[in-house]
Structures are given as C-alpha cells and as structure tokens.
Image (cartoon, grey):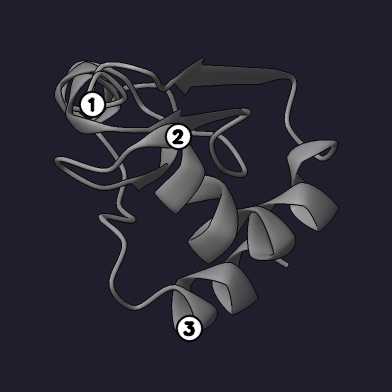
Amino acid sequence: MVVGLTALCSSLVFAQGADHSKADAGPNCLILGDSIAVGTAQQARCMVAALNGISTKQWVRQFSATVEPIASAFEVVLISLGSNDGK
C-alpha cells in the first residue's frame, strides 16, 4: 500500500531516513508535512510525505486524499504543518 503512495505522490519527498541496524518488515512511522518534517525524517527511519515550503492548506489540497487511506497502517504518525501559514 505504501508503494502505491510513492507512485501517486511523485512530487513528494518520499523516502526513508537514516539506515538503522535493526532488520524489520518496514517503517512503522509516517512523517507528514513541511520542511521541518523533511529535516526530522533525516534522523528517523520512517516513511515521509513532506515538501519544503508547503503550507497546511496546500498540503491538504495536494496530498491528504492520498495519505489518509494509509495513515492508520502506521504505529506513529508525526505531522509538522503550519510553519509556512503566516502569509
């Protein structure tokens, strides 16, 4: 299911963070949001759906329909939005 998200969100930064020595079936966390989420993902082994400079309104319009159906599959979902909303 996550692989499908990668294909649908080609403009997203959608990658795994730092490689950890634990071998597991895949990440159990999802990081969503803006550039803060992108930076956080560099330190975590999570799936990421984040874009530098994006506002909350833009993120919801562009990506929520794709992310919402898969979010419940993750044990942890971190959302970082609002930093670019002050315009």
Inspect the image, locate mark 2, and give the three-letter code of the amino acid beneath it. Thr
The residue wearing badge 1 is 84
Residue drawn at x 25%, y 55% as measured from the top left: 13
- Could you say which quadrant of the image residue 30 lies in? top right
Residue drawn at x 56%, y 35% as measured from the top left: 24
- Could you say which quadrant of the image residue 61 lies in? bottom right
Residue 56's tag is 2
Inspect the image, locate mark 1, and give the three-letter code of the amino acid beneath it. Asn
Q: Are marks 2 and 3 in contact (CB under 8 Å)?
A: no
| Element class at badge 3 | helix
| Element class at badge 2 | helix
> Quadrant of the image for the C terminus?
top left
- Could you say which quadrant of the image residue 21 lies in? top left
Q: Is residue 2 left or right of residue 9?
A: right
Q: CA distance from mark 2 to mark 1?
A: 8 Å
Q: Report the residue that reaches farthest toward the front.
A: 87
Q: Report the front residue among 80 and 55.
A: 55
The label nearer to you, 2 versus 3, is 2
Q: Is residue 46 above or below residue 14?
A: above
The label nearer to you, 1 versus 3, is 1
Residue 9 image position (x, y, % from top left): 44, 73
How dense is the environment of label 1, judged by Cα within 10 Å: few (below 14), some, or many (20 and up)?
some
Residue 45 image position (x, y, % from top left): 36, 27
Q: Report the front residue among 45 and 23.
A: 45
Q: Is residue 18 left or right of residue 67?
A: left
Residue 7's tag is 3
How dense is the environment of label 2, judged by Cα within 10 Å: few (below 14), some, or many (20 and up)?
some
Q: Are marks 2 and 1 in contact (CB under 8 Å)?
A: yes
